[in-house]
Amino acid sequence: MRYLPLSAADRRQMLAVIGARAIDDLYADVPASALNATIDLPAHQGELEVERMMGAMAAKNRAAGAGPFFVGCGAYKHHVPASVDHIIQRSEFLTSYTPYQPEIAQGTLQYLFEFQTQVAALFGMEVANASMYDGSTGCAEAALMARRVTKRGRVVLSGALHPHYAAVTRTNSELLGDKVVQLPIDPEAREDLLAAIDGDTSCVIVQNPDVFGNLRDLTALSAACRDKGVLLVAVVTEAMSLGAVKSPGEMGADIVVGEGQSIGNGLNFGGPYVGLFATREKYMRQMPGRLCGQTVDADGKRGFVLTLSTREQHIRRDKATSNICTNSGLCALAFTAHMTLLGEKGLRRVAALNHEAASKTADALAAIKGVEVLTKSFFNEFTLRLPKNATGVVEALAADGVLGGVPGERLWPHDPAAHDLLIVAATECVTDADIGAFSKSLTKVLAQ
Amino acid sequence: MTMNREGRPTRGEATNADIATFTGNRALQIEESLIFEKDAFAETGVDFPAPASKTDRLGAMKRTAPIGLPGLSEPEAMRHFVRLSQKNYAIDMGPFPLGSCTMKHNPRLNEKMARLPGFGDIHPLQPVSTVQGALELIDTLSAWLLELTAMPAVAMSPKAGAHGELCGMMTIKAALEARGEAARTRVLAPESAHGTNPATAAQCGFTVDDIPVDETGRIDLAAFREKLRDDVAGIMVTNPNTCGLFEREIRAIADAVHEAGGYFYCDGANFNAIAGKVRPGDLGNDAMHINLHKPFSTPHGGGGPGAGPTVFSAALAPFAPIPFVVREDGKFHLVETRRAAEAEGDAQAGGRITAFHGQMGMFVRALAYMLSHGGDGIRQASEDAVLNANYILARLKAEMSPAFDGYCMHECLFDDRFLEGTGVDTLDFAKAMIDEGFHPMTMYFPLVVHGAMLIEPTESESKQELDLFCDALLDLAKKAKAGEAARFKASPMLAPRRRLDETAAARKPVLRWTQGAAPKAAE
């Protein structure tokens, strides 16, 4: 077996050194009736056979890059430079562990420090951690952090927060007995979040651009939250938007969480992604997750270490700020490498191209009879109201080779008010020909 | 000095390793600044055309202030990250014997499969009809996990081991509530448990009650039984445990907790010792997470991403969280909401714990490994992992002090008795290993052993590599006993950095780069 270096002779010699007769002597503590149970699985195979089997499964899926593609809602297809994938496949990054021995993990630690700095800058915040599992779990952790800071137990969710993020936050907050209040779905950014806040509220969670694509100015909301001692949690599921759209930090958010997949990471059917988490310096010690900090070594040279670990489970156990241990290290590296290539200049340029592609797409689709574009101010994603249930439309488009967005019913299956909505995203990967194909196909499908 | 015939020296002269260089570099070790220190705030390493139109639907939301992100050209970026990489130790370079972390070989076939466009370039919200192969893969992996664990159900969405614990414990909480027994709020966990166990229980609203460990390194059965009262929600047990030992009385423990009305959560962190040999479902488990990187070789990438699918007993299965995959009439479907689960006859399904459907990229890698190894290879890998650990234990006994008597499972535990009176402590000993070219073992964990050193070689090490590792540790132990404490205190001396001041880092945290003057705006 190609992954196992020991030979039969090695095994015999080693058993002799150990003083055991057979391998099962070493398993003597296992109840005899439970040892060596029959397991009904196929035998080992060579690379070639495995590639054939898995290739056949992969071939049954329609890859985003195989044709016109307009799907978003929390995961976006962007172009990632070829060098990024080479960097993350360096053995020293790919096959290292959590940097517990900083003297031989400065590579990981330095990129985490760079990652934290990039995330803080992108969000317009003071400090960021070394990543969460993804945006949705980061969102849930933000609500728990607001609970610790405010010592209050009521969470208010915008009706335009990604419903998966809302569900994850509800699951986690309700485990601790907190009340979670969610506003009705809000495709046109009309909700009154202020009216939902009371003196028991720990935080308000609002997404920008929201799940329907609307841009929201959080400035007035953040001021009102401050007056009432409520923390404003801003969620960004499209990190690329921050190359064009004012950051949550500039609008006064207290905690900003986001999905970093757009920078450096592929779609991967939903994971692994990289959760971004940032806050104000005064709340630093209430943050969940790993933090990398700067220090010096015994010779006075600059170096980096994991720090403030007295917040974490391996030290504080049941008093930790979170149970999180593993983060998204390698996805954070992909983010950092891609962002290092982009720089502010490239980020602003790609963001502008996203905005242009989405604007063109919206204009083209708005011209189709029966289609209404609901979103007035957006970045690279917007919502259409269709004259019929959008799920069937999306299926018909797919049959035509166009992946034409996310139908409202997929995200809110039990809310009929969402069923004629279609959420459409267009990134720099979308061409004029793609927009033409989408427009033509949608015209045809709606006429049927 | 040895010369060749042209008079060119063929061997260097012995010299002082502390020689100072002008650059601060040491041959292959190149000092590397932060990207923020390269004066590149107005540069970029990507080429995109300028937008053709001036459309702007951003209004007042346009970002105008400088962001402060430097951009490097591709050669500069490659150098930056490659130089950084060379300051890291990795399993591809040598043994990485971190006990309870399991650093094994990461096959590159896994990486190749994960990058097939049909897996890597599909969107989680594409029409289900266009991702049938992806759902088939999840379904296939689930079937392998269920067969290996003899459990009837699995939740695939947990993002890592600790997230799997959360998934398991919240499911236990839901099952108790459904029984009208929400008053059961106390969770038992041995004091040798991973910190994630008590942290997870607390995050679910439980209180945690530590169970002492007996003189054999296992749960103290009498103390455990005494703690079983009618407010017990369940027990969290790592098996094999964090001392590297199998809990001999695991069935008695499971039976007792069940009799008392609680559930048995197994922390599956050490499943790699028994995968293919022992099925956890045969031992009374109600729930267990599986860290895919441990038995099934997904890369750990400097701290993640992980994946922690969680298997459930029949008693807990109805309460497992959404989403899940179902197969009907030869087609795969995704159940993505609790109400949809209800329509499938799963009225009590738990709430969502993450967006989308789990760590698909990790699923592909794990399945590539499982198909490669097969049932026979998975069993052989577990046996080799246990054999390697026992070989190290047998060889190091001569100079080091095993924490407990007898054989171990996939990791062997030493305490610091062998260093008594030498002036060398566990940390010094570990740091000295770095200069010998090895990553240290896990230090000071589990907490039940003084100055713990937990060594997990995995099945990926050859006998030759193990012998060198053992010889080096025996040599270090002898040197410590021979009074060479000063050398240990100063180590590591040959690594990219000497010991780092962690106290200073925590006292006045610097968590990001800053510059006095605001960086120049780009564009």
Image (tube, coloured by chain):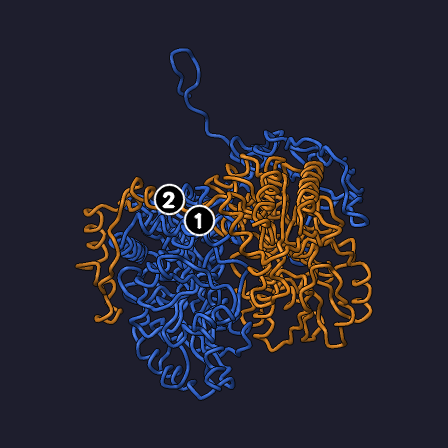
Chain colours: A orange, B blue
Mark nearer the N terminus (1 vs 2): 2
- SS at mark 1 in the image: loop
Residue drawn at 81 percent across, 58 percent down: A219
Residue reaching furthest to the front: A448
Q: Chain of mark 1?
A: B
Give the vertical position of B245 relative to B86 (above or below).
Answer: below
Nearer to the camera, A74 or A48: A74
Q: Residues within 10 Å of mark 1 (few under 14, many from 20)?
A: many
Judging by the rendered image, the residue that carries numbered circle 1 is B299
The N terminus of chain A - image quarter: top left
Q: Chain of mark 2?
A: B
Residue drawn at 67 percent across, 58 percent down: A235
Q: Residues within 10 Å of mark 2 (few under 14, many from 20)?
A: some
Q: Is residue B291 left or right of residue A406?
A: left
Look at label 1 and name its amino acid.
Answer: Pro
Q: Position of residue B130 (x, y in %)?
A: 46, 49
Any part of residue B344 in sight: yes
Residue reaching furthest to the left: A21
Q: Is residue B253 left or right of residue A374?
A: left
Residue reaching furthest to the top: B6
Q: Position of residue A94 (x, y in %)?
A: 47, 44
Judging by the rendered image, the residue that carries numbered circle 2 is B107
Q: In whole angstroms, how far apart are the C-alphas of marks 1 and 2?
A: 9 Å
Q: Position of residue B1 (x, y in %)?
A: 42, 21
